[in-house]
Amino acid sequence: MHNELQIPIQDESAIKQTLLSFAEVRMAIIFGSLAKHKATFNSDLDIAILVEKKISPELKLNLINSLASRIGRPVDLIDLNEVGEPLLGEILQHGKMIIGNATLKGNLLTRHLMDLADFVPYQTRILKERRNAWINS
């Protein structure tokens, strides 16, 4: 089927230029099928954004609308200030940074490693307990 054809990432420079028009954006990482060059015609743009503080609803809506109208795809926008595990790890490991610098990425990597050490063992234990309770019910 034609909607299963792989297409290259939408104009990365158009995405970057759109984001650069928002002074608040400090970092942007494309992830998901577009970053892996495995997008179909139905794929959305998965993008993680870092601003100074939490992204306001107004800014999020403006970013999504601007990106969607520029590239002609639905947009799934993730706030890097709020994203948790395991999605943060996936974004950092498999995403492509198009705006930002090594210091900002290093700060996110540090947070990711701290979260892995502090919270993921609890998440794993809770999920295991829930799974066992469901299986044994």
Image (cartoon, grey):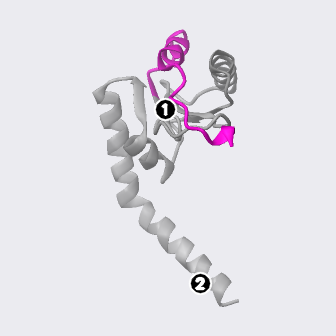
* Three-letter amino acid code of the residue under disc 2: Asn
* Three-letter amino acid code of the residue under disc 1: Ile
Residue 88, position as x, y percentages in the image: 46, 45
Closest to the observer: 127 or 36?
Answer: 36
Q: Is residue 5 left or right of residue 114?
A: right
Residue 16, position as x, y percentages in the image: 48, 17
Q: Is residue 42 left or right of residue 111?
A: right
Q: Residue 30, labelled with which disc? A: 1
Closest to the observer: 49 or 126?
Answer: 49
For label 2, count other residues whose C-alpha is less than 10 Å away and answer few (under 14), some (14-19) or many (20+): few
Q: Quadrant of residue 21?
A: top right
Q: Which residue is mark 2?
A: 132
For label 1, count other residues whose C-alpha is less than 10 Å away and answer few (under 14), some (14-19) or many (20+): many
- Of all residues shown, which one is farthest toward the bottom? 136
> Which element type, helix, strand or loop, lies under badge 1?
strand
Who's the residue at 67% across and 38% down the image? Answer: 2
- Name the quadrant of the N terminus: top right
Q: Is residue 115 above or below residue 61?
A: below
Which residues, given as a range, are shown in magenta?
1-28
Marks 2 and 1 close (CB-CB < 8 Å)? no
Q: Is residue 21 magenta?
A: yes
Distance from disc 2 to disc 1, alpha carbons, whole Å, reads 36 Å
- Name the quadrant of the C terminus: bottom right
Q: Is residue 42 magenta?
A: no
Who's the residue at 43% across and 38% down the image? Answer: 95
